[in-house]
Amino acid sequence: MINAAVLISGSGSNLQALIDQSAAGEMPAKIKLVISNNPDAFGLERAKQAGIPSIVVRHTDFNSREEFDRAMSYHLDQAKVDLVILAGFMRILSEFFVENFQERLINIHPSLLPKFPGTNTHSRVLEAGEEWHGASIHFVVPEVDAGPIILQGRIKVRENDTAESLQQRVHKVEHQIYPLAVSWFAANRLTISGERVLLDDEISAEQLQTFEL
Ligand code: GRF
C-alpha cells in the first residue's frame, strides 16, 4: 500500500473515483492528503466526506510560482507521500516542483496525447474531425501536457457529438483509467524507459484501452 496526495482546483470527480476505488480495496493506495489552490473547490467537500485531511494553499498568497510550489512541497513532504496525483489541478508547476517529485508525479489530461495538449480539447477534437478522443495519464515533466504516457482510454467520436457530450464521456473514461494507473504505480509495475512507460517491463496493449461509452 502506498501513500498518495491528490492536487485539485475544482469539482474533483477524479478525486472521487480515486477515493471510491481506494475505499473498495480495488486500488492499493491510501489518499493521505488533498491540496487545493482554490478554497471553493468542491473536491474539498469530497475529501471532508471521506475523512481525508485537506489543505488550501492559495497561489495568490505567494509572490512567485516557485514560492507557491515550495509551500505545497512542504506539506507533501510532511505527509510522506509516495505519489502526487494531479486531478484537475489548474496551475502550471515550476521546474523545482517537477524535479522534487520526479517519477512520482502524474497527471490526467482530456485528450489522446500528444494530440491536443492545452485547453478546450473537446471542441478542438470535433473541429479537427478526429475519429478517436479520450484521456491520457502521464508522468509529469517540466513541459506542460507532455511526459511519458502510462495509460490512455479512448472512445469513438460520434457524428452527433458536441463538446459537452464528449466531455461527459471522456470524464467517465477518466474515472476508470485513473484508479487503474495508480494501481499499476502502487504495485510497482511501471518503469520509465526514455520517452515511454513500460508495464511489467514491456509496452503493453493494456496501456491503450477502448471504451464503448
Ligand atoms: C479532467 O477532465 C482532467 O482531465 C483535467 O481536468 C478535469 C478535472 O475534472 N485535467 P474533475 O475536477 O476531476 O472533475
Image (cartoon, rainbow, N blue to C red):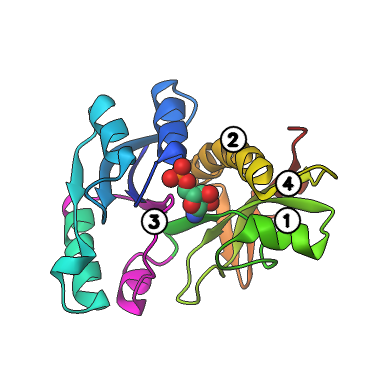
Callout 1: 10 Å neighbours few (<14), some, many (20+)? few
Mark sitting earlier along the chain (2/1):
2
Badge 3 amino acid = Phe
Question: From the viewer's perspective, is the residue at label 2 or at label 1 nearer?
Answer: 2
Query: Residue visible at 77% across and 47% down?
Result: 205
- The amino acid pointed to by label 1 is Ile
The CA distance from mark 4 to mark 2 is 11 Å
Instruction: Give the SS element for disc 1.
Output: loop
- Would residue 171 be found to the left or right of residue 31 on screen? right
Task: Say if 36 sits above or below 21 in the image.
Answer: below
Q: Is residue 112 visible?
A: no
Q: Residue at x 55, y 59 (%)?
A: 138
91 vs 177, nearest the viewer:
91
Look at mark 1 in the image and give the residue it sits on: 203
Left/right placement of residue 24 relative to residue 161 reads: left
Residue at disc 3, CB closer than 8 Å to ligand 1: yes
Q: Is residue 42 magenta?
A: no
The quarter of the picture where residue 30 lies is top left
Instruction: State which mark lies toward you, 1 or 4.
Output: 4
In this figure, which residue is indicated by the disc labeled 2?
Answer: 176
Residue 154 numbered mark, or none: 4
In front of the other: 74 or 173: 173
**Where are the magenta residues, as a range?**
78-102
Task: Name the front one of labels 3 and 1.
Answer: 3
Q: Position of residue 200 (x, y in %)?
A: 64, 49
Asked if the residue at tag 1 contacts the one at tag 3, i.e. Cβ–Cβ closer than 8 Å, the answer is no
Percent position (x, y) of residue 79? 20, 48
